[in-house]
Amino acid sequence: MTELLVTPKSVAHIETLIEKGADAFVIGEQKFGLRLAGEFDKQAMQQAVELIHRNGKKAYAAVNGIFHNYHLNALEAYIGFLHEVKVDRIIFGDPAVVMFVKDQTNPIPLNWDAEALVTNHFQCNYWGKKGAQRAQLARELSLEEIINIKKHANVEIEVQVHGMTCMFQSKRMLLGNYYTFQERQMKIERNKEANELLLYDEERDNKYPVYEDYNGTHIMSPNDICLIEELDSLLEVGIDALKIDGVLQTEEYINVCTEQYREAIDLYNEDPEAYDDEKFMLVDPIEEIQPEHRPFDEGFLYKQTVY
């Protein structure tokens, strides 16, 4: 059965998302994980895992940051903590995580998520031999490439079906440089309601969310991926997990998306023809709350990798 994977903002939010039909949750803290929807310190992690397991769901800890030597002691301790609270999977991008997990008595299974690097089945199978049970594919792949990877992969395959895409990350804090050097080509626009910075490209009329955290500066795509009308192509080939990424989104927005994608998946499983008839209406509740400056698109499902 295909898993609906979501990104909660708090422990209380997890309760709501369980009611909305989520199967699994990505949780963690920005010190170790990249672009999380919510911040979960150790106490919150323990509470979240207990809540998730009580309801028969899965908890995945995000440890997919970029680690330097000075991070390694803290990383090793954190991996030990995750084994104490018994998360179901550890999401990684750095081989250091693999090495520390292997040192544990009962290693937790791994999900490989190296962002734009997960682009062929050889990579997926390589990390499968190193302990990964799943690969989260790059958002820049076409449907044909996704299907081909699923056909030849020996691990579970996860695809993001909704939310923002990270276009650029720097370990440096770059917003000051934008103000200083980019004023003639780009403008920084502050959206007070969303409490975020938007990099405005006047020529294309695109607004790119920009934010800084422990991991540096992140520039996100101007559009949101929305594949709720394209799920049949993914479900037909047995994609193992569909992810809704809620970074920089509100709880209400994540709730509505979770509810609608749950309905879409269940409808397809019950009757693919009924899904085909109703899929165009399933997107309506999401469109009603979609920010005006962020149109939907299908990512790179049907086009080349050009931003």
Image (tube, rainbow, N blue to C red):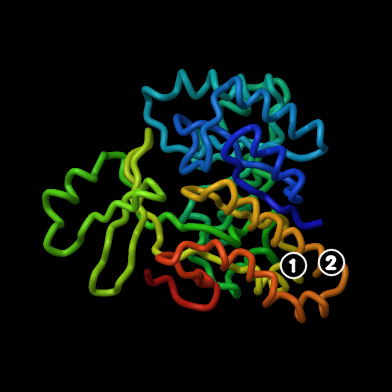
Label 2 crowd (10 A; few <14 / some 14-19 / many >=20):
some
Name the element at disc 2: helix
Q: In this view, does 150 lie above or below 90?
A: below
Q: Is residue 83 left or right of residue 92?
A: right
9 vs 67, nearest the viewer: 9
Point out the tag, 1 or 2, that comes first from the N-terminus: 1
Residue under the point 57% across and 68% down: 287
Write down the quadrant of residue 275 in the picture: bottom right
46 vs 256, nearest the viewer: 256
**Looking at the rendering, in which quadrant would you find the N terminus?**
bottom right
Q: In this view, does 228 lie to the left or right of 300?
A: right
Residues at discs 1 and 2 in contact (Cβ within 8 Å)? yes
Residue under the point 42% across and 37% down: 66
The amino acid beneath tag 1 is: Leu
Write down the quadrant of residue 85 in the picture: top right
Residue 154: x %, y % from top left: 71, 55
Q: Name the residue under label 1.
A: 235
The amino acid beneath tag 2 is: Asn
Label 1 crowd (10 A; few <14 / some 14-19 / many >=20):
some
Residue under the point 73% across and 73% down: 232
105 vs 3, nearest the viewer: 3
Q: Name the residue under label 2.
A: 269
Q: Residue furthest right?
A: 270
Q: In this view, does 162 lie to the left or right of 181?
A: right
Q: Is residue 148 above or below residue 16?
A: below
Residue 262: x %, y % from top left: 74, 58
Q: Is residue 213 above or below residue 225?
A: above
Residue 99: x %, y % from top left: 56, 29
Name the element at disc 1: helix
**Looking at the rendering, in which quadrant would you find the C terminus?**
bottom left
Q: Nearer the viewer, mark 1 or mark 2?
A: 2
